[in-house]
Image (cartoon, rainbow, N blue to C red):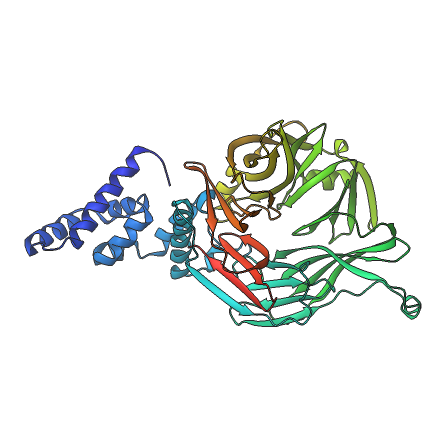
Amino acid sequence: MPSNPSVTRPCKLLRRISSGFRRRGHQPSSHSATLSYISKVSDVVWFEIALYSDISEVQSLVLTCRFIHNIISVRVFWLYRLHALEQDNAPNLPPHISISTLTLPQLRTLVIRAHRRHRNCMRPGTLRPTREIRVNIKCPYLHDISSNQALLPGGELFLVWTAEGYIQCFNVRKRKCIWTYQPKEPMSREEILERQPYKLKVEGFDYDMQANGDVHVLVVSGVSSPRGIGTRIIEIIQSSPQTKIPRPRYTYKRENIWNVDILTVLAKLSGGVLAVCMDDRLLLTFWEENRSVLIRGSEFESIDLTDNHLICTQYGSRRESVVAIRLSSLYKKLRDLNATRNSVKSLTLNDLPHARCPITPNPDWLVKNTVVSICNFHWKPEAERKARGINITVSQTGKDLNTSRIFLQVDSFHLDEALLLDGGIPQLTHHKHWLTGLDPQINWYCTSMPPSQAGQILIHCYSSNGFSLKLATTSYEDGMVLKELPMLSIICNMKFYSGALYFLTSDFASLVIQYFD
């Protein structure tokens, strides 16, 4: 919402009119006078007043005044309010869904819930869910805590990848499994007959929603043998809402890898590009054309993909940096190197045009983990979205070596796609910094999940009092608020996405989704 003083005047005017209707004991004459006053003002003026007023005041007036209700119960009003949402109150709108396909009630619900979630998260006290969905998943393969899961944008589909390599997709609304898929193990019949204890390990996966409703799932798996030599497989499978039968779209296999089961793997998929990070190597593949580049010699701790950029955090020279690589420039580089299909070019980060901005944690910190996520304002008009660029949120947790206290640091960076420097490099600048200390009694913590689209971070903590769960909400106007979430039971594999907390129960029998809007 705009922060200029002129906005407060419409809000106060709207509040006085709304309270005038609700005031007990008012006389009919005063009621008629208020209606007369409202009718004398142009509809356009009331539309503008409601457009810049607090959403709770607009809701209150809609319930008490049919005249105002008729003015704002139009699609264009809620479309304006949706486009005006900033990152603090980002809507839970899947990027693949076109806004033109949303109905008026859907637009209104998106805007109201986005404002309500941000207001609830910024209020003092324990944050409690406003609604909950429980789904009995009944997965016979789900019995290991190493299982991965993802609630897809919109909260309609839920993906589970088990330790055995099975991938299952559940429809949350219908509360049933719609398909099951298992990648083929890269073992020959002779190896199976030898009964060597080969082990299939789940290493990472990601997904990408398509405009037609299809889901592309990136699967990274590894098979290790007792001799220490293994095989890594990168596979993309496609699921269509029409057929509901997953089918492979892309497969990459690399054999004779030593210690395949000890590498840390980060995987991301966006459009026709996939990124898989394995310790000091980052594989970028334009998978529809099967052209790849392997970036060596850099330690990447976290990665994310946009339509035209790879965003990552890189550690080097005793400090971390945010790095942005323009994918169009990378593709041009591959063409200049005459990279053919099914080939992998090996380069270093210095060989590629990229933007860089340092992250500056406290020098007395022992940084445990760094995670990154992006917000590209996909709910705004295309022209404004390009002018806005990309907001990058980086969260770091660390322990002060002097006091042994755990701190959470969150930094916001801005990637300006419209302003290109020499070599076609976009401008990357530091935007905002937040810092807060956790309870001194906490001796274990984890922030393995990237920040949500609205810049919220979920923190798992453990102290002498047991496990606890905290949610850090960042706001450009109100700073950072750290709130405790209620622990309903012993739960595992907790994830957080766009204001929804979801987790599997301890018996792996149910999926629980909690909303705070």
Tell me: 169 left or right of 283: left
Residue 17 shows in the view: yes
Asked if residue 155 is positioned above or below residue 346 in the image, the reply reads below
- What is the number of callouts on the image? 0
Point out residue 263 in the picture as x, y percentages from the top left corner: 78, 48
| Residue drawn at x 59%, y 46% as measured from the top left | 450
Q: Nearer the viewer, residue 398 or 98?
A: 398
Point out residue 140 in the picture as x, y percentages from the top left corner: 67, 72
| Residue drawn at x 51%, y 47% as measured from the top left | 470
Q: Nearer the viewer, residue 381 or 187?
A: 187
Quadrant of the image for the N terminus? top left
Q: Quadrant of residue 423?
A: top right
Q: Quadrant of residue 188?
A: bottom right
Q: Residue furthest front?
A: 464
Residue 338 shows in the view: no
Asked if residue 174 is positioned above or below residue 217 in the image, the reply reads below
Point out residue 449 in the picture as x, y percentages from the top left corner: 60, 48
Tell me: 257 left or right of 9: right
Point out residue 356 in the picture as x, y percentages from the top left corner: 65, 31
| Residue drawn at x 9%, y 55% as measured from the top left | 25
Tell me: 63 left or right of 426: left
Quadrant of the image for the C terminus? bottom left
| Residue drawn at x 79%, y 49% as measured from the top left | 262
